[in-house]
Image (cartoon, rainbow, N blue to C red):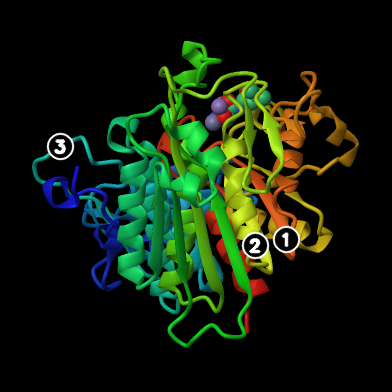
Amino acid sequence: MSEEKTGWPRLPDTTQVFAESAKDGRSIWFIGEDDDPANLLTEAGVSPDWLKANPVTGRAKRTALLAGRDGDLAGAALGIGNGEAGEPCGPSELLVGKLAKSLPAGNYRLATPEGAKAELAAIAWGLGAYQFQRYRGKGEDSPVPRLAIPAGADAQRIAAIVEGVWFGRDLINTPASDMGPDDLEAAARLLAKRHGANISVTTGDELLTKNLPMIHAVGRASDRAPRLLDLSWQPASGGADLKTVTLVGKGITFDTGGLDLKPAAGMALMKKDMGGAASALALAHMIMALQLPVNLRVLIPAAENSVAGNAFRPSDILTSRSGRTVEIGNTDAEGRLVLADALTLGGEANPDLMISLATLTGAARVALGPDLPAFFCDDDDFANSAARHGDAIGDPVWRMPFWRGYESRFDSQVADMNNISDGPFAGAITAALFLRRFAGNAGRYAHIDLYGWRPSSKPLGPKGGEPHAARMLMNLLSEECAS
Ligand code: BES
Ligand code: MN
Ligand code: ZN
């Protein structure tokens, strides 16, 4: 349905959870494990009697509301333990996200910490405050707590990062009934319009004439046509000698498994199979809003892996854009097929860096669980930077190898390769190897196999969609592309 009718897709507005000024704000104090906060807090106006009756400790995640001498709410204390948040993994500032949901409505300011820590705390606040509102409470929004942007923090950066994540979450949380390939296109068009980016879209049978046959094969059984979204952007200051970064995001808007149908439990969450596309678009928003000096291209193969008489079948042999033929061992290994054609296309322009983002395998989740995306890259320095940036902000990744010893598992008797590997082992690695075969022309290639979903509410966000690795990549690319 069109944007005019529903108001969706939309770019989120995070100003509702941030206050313009720190004036009149109640204070939030971070209390460490070894701190004795009584003096500090009483000097700041907290009632000594209250503190006697309700001692404040720095145990991690412990939150306390504090009464002033007049009995009114004076502020809140947040226990930060030894400075590590524990969960989410990362610095303790991230725990502020918890307060964004639990404090009474009103304005707040951070009494501590300062500088970069305060900026990360403000981002965490924004992330923790997110709610998916599309299908609920058409009435007025109930008032929420607001945090003043800390002095010296980059308000634009905070907003761009929080908006990007909210946008990605909205896309994932929207069920497939309202998030088909057409709706994903509408979302990408909206983003492009906002930032003055170019977008071109190849839809339906045109995928065949433009030589993107595997995207067509995977998506043709749905009554919503498959398509390739191709967005490109350069900063206002021009892009002639900037590095080119191409993001390729898996946009399977629902994965039934195709004819090798998924069982109910495996299908239940498959509206999130466009999580890689959501991460790519979330990151694209951050990059464009903050004018990162980079030539950006985002490729999203958007398709629904459906069941119908014209569906592609096990044992079919597809010819990929690269010319190599692929025997279908299982139609549920569809992500690698659509990504292969998009990666081939992306590689044809020889980008300096190409990154695929995808909810690609259940095996990556068996290995690392839902919170920790698997990161593949042959470049040690790049992989180490990714891990370091992720850890610093609570958006971690863990490296896994492109282990070439497993390449032979794709051997096929009848085609150049099969789309599934022989045997049950190392499914995340073999899927990554499959993709790498098609990404050959990029200067560097990295692949991230992510879950795209938070299974239960945590300080950094509620249960639901999560555009994993977008924040990490924003910081990583800011460092890589600084000019
Ligand atoms: N979208 C799934 C992978 C997935 C499943 C991600 C569950 C997160 C949670 C993907 O298309 C898929 O079905 N992969 C198969 C591959 C297999 C058929 C080789 C898988 O992982 O089981
Ligand atoms: Mn699948
Ligand atoms: Zn899938």
Q: Nearer the viewer, residue 10 or 307?
A: 307
Q: Earlier in the sequence, mark 3 or mark 1?
A: 3
Q: Residue furthest bottom?
A: 237
Indicate the position of residue 173 as horizontal and vertical percent values: 36, 37
Q: Which residue is mark 2?
A: 348
In space, the residues marked 2 and 1 are separated at their CA atoms by 6 Å
Label 1's element? Answer: loop
* Amino acid marked by disc 2: Glu
Label 3's element? Answer: loop
Q: Residue at x 32, y 44 (%)?
A: 182
In space, the residues marked 2 and 3 are separated at their CA atoms by 47 Å
* Amino acid marked by disc 1: Asn
Q: Is mark 2 within 8 Å of ligand 3?
A: no
Seen in the picture, residue 30 relative to 101 is either above or below; the reply is below
* Amino acid marked by disc 3: Gly
Indicate the position of residue 175 as horizontal and vertical percent values: 33, 32
Q: Which residue is mark 3?
A: 137
Label 2's element? Answer: loop
Q: Residue at x 56, y 43 (%)?
A: 59
Seen in the picture, residue 408 relative to 103 is either above or below; the reply is above
Indicate the position of residue 140 as horizontal and vertical percent values: 10, 46
Q: Earlier in the sequence, mark 2 or mark 1?
A: 2
Q: Which residue is mark 1?
A: 441
Q: Residue at x 13, y 52 (%)?
A: 4
Q: Earlier in the sequence, mark 2 or mark 3?
A: 3
Seen in the picture, residue 370 relative to 4 is either above or below; the reply is above
Q: Residue furthest top?
A: 263
Q: Nearer the viewer, residue 164 or 314?
A: 314
Classify residue 142 by image quadrant.
Answer: top left
Q: Residue furthest right?
A: 405
| Label 2 close to label 3 by CB (< 8 Å) | no
Q: Residue furthest front?
A: 209
